[in-house]
């Protein structure tokens, strides 16, 4: 199943940091934007998998236009695909 959550991408010195406002403490970094986004997809997938296993529910998705960003930040949707095994129907 595909999940799409908004992420805030911030350029910090020579690295990129990605955080998900809706997913508490879900962050990733990378030396390049592409690396940071790939790391963010993995972090998002892991966060969602653990949350579904423990709580069974995910937070609501905030609209991109409702996320405040600073001058050196941008916001975009990042998708993660989670493959369910037993007990889940797609």
Image (spheres, rainbow, N blue to C red):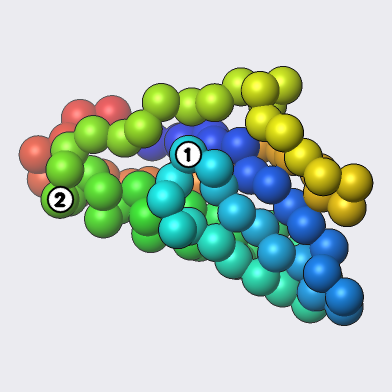
On the image, the x and y values in percent for residue 17 come to 70, 64
Please tell me which residue is depicted at 60% across the width and 54% down the height of the picture: 19
* Residue that numbered label 1 is attached to: 22
Kindly report which numbered mark, 2 or 1, lies closer to the viewer in this rendering: 1
Residue appearing at x 45%, y 58% in the figure:
25
Q: Residue at x 69, y 47 (%)?
A: 8
Dot label at residue 77: none
Determine the secondary structure under disc 1: loop
Q: What residue appears at the point 11 percent right and 45 percent down from the top-left corner?
A: 86
Residue 35 appears anywhere in the view = no
The N terminus: image quadrant:
top left
Q: Earlier in the sequence, mark 2 or mark 1?
A: 1
Q: Position of residue 71 (x, y in %)?
A: 90, 46
Q: Quadrant location of the C terminus? A: top left
Question: Badge 2: how crowded within 10 Å, few (<14), some, or many (20+)?
Answer: few
Closer to the camera in the image, 75 or 68: 68
Residue receiving disc 2: 54
Q: CA distance from mark 2 to mark 1?
A: 17 Å
Q: Is residue 74 above or below residue 42?
A: above
On screen, 78 above or below 36? above
Q: Measured along the vertical axis of the image, is residue 48 above or below residue 62? A: below
């Amino acid at each position: 199943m595909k999940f799409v959550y908004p992420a805030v991408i911030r350029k910090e010195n020579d690295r990129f940091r990605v955080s998900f406002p809706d997913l508490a403490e879900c962050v990733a970094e990378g030396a390049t934007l592409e690396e940071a986004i790939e790391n963010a997809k993995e972090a998002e997938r892991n966060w969602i998998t653990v949350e579904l296993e423990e709580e069974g529910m995910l937070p609501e998705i905030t609209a991109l236009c409702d996320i405040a960003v600073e001058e050196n930040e941008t916001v975009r949707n990042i998708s993660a695909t989670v493959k369910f095994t037993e007990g889940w129907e797609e």
